[in-house]
Image (tube, grey):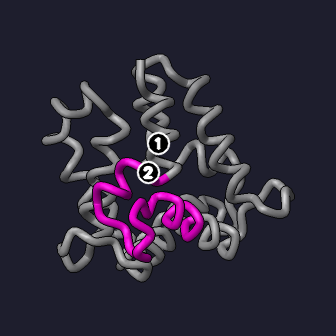
Amino acid sequence: MRLGHVLAWLAMGLAPMAAHAERDPGRAIAELFATQMDADRDGVLEDGEVIAFSEAVFSSMDIDGSGGLTFEEMRDWEHGMADLATFRHREEAFDASIGMAFALFDRDRDGLISPAEYKAGVRIAAGLADGDKNGTLTVNEYLDGFIFNVAMRTALAG
């Protein structure tokens, strides 16, 4: 999956989601991600689809091209939810949620998430969200249980 496709699709999807975003902005954005991630449109997010999407996201967050993510890069990702958090006056909650996600991914606690740590974190998060433990995620499992989605919905609520 190419990052350009991900970003173009996200940009096109932001306008129609406005009404839903008022009710649950974190879920609305997660729905955009899930739709893009589900490359074969079968309603199931296989490991390969999740990893391909996450690799594109990782690359787009790595602003300085260092091969690792800092907390600031994760928080300030241009296609993330920082602007929405600011608009909703939820910056503190947003920073706390990003901090939690960052800490979960930064397994060696060196302040930098490597591609391997990110991939492992995504797989762990997918496994935790897999409610029926069948090794794949339905779109609803992803939306309701993927740790980053849960953290963002919590951060943006209010």
Can residue 136 be seen here?
Answer: yes
The quarter in which the C terminus is drawn is: top left
Q: Is residue 2 magenta?
A: no
Q: Amino acid at mark 1?
A: Val
Instruction: Please report the residue visible at 16 percent of the width from the left and 30 percent of the height from the top.
Output: 19
Q: Which mark is residue 2?
A: none
Q: CA distance from mark 2 to mark 1?
A: 6 Å
Few, some or many residues within 10 Å of mark 2 (<14, 14–19, 20+): many
- Verify CB contact (< 8 Å) between mark 2 and mark 1: yes
Q: Quadrant of the N terminus?
A: bottom left
Q: Provide residue 148's location: percent of width, then percent of height.
A: 51, 49
Element class at badge 1: helix
Q: Quadrant of residue 134?
A: bottom left
Identity of the residue furthest to the bottom in this view: 48
Could you say which disc has been placed on residue 150 in the image? Answer: 1
Range of the magenta residues? Answer: 122-146
Q: Residue at x 38, y 74 (%)?
A: 136
Q: Is residue 149 above or below residue 107?
A: above
Circle 2 — which element? helix
What residue does disc 2 label?
A: 145
Q: Nearer the viewer, residue 154 or 68?
A: 154
Judge whether residue 130 is colored magenta: yes
Given the image, on which type of amino acid does mark 2 rest? Gly
Q: Is residue 47 left or right of residue 38?
A: right
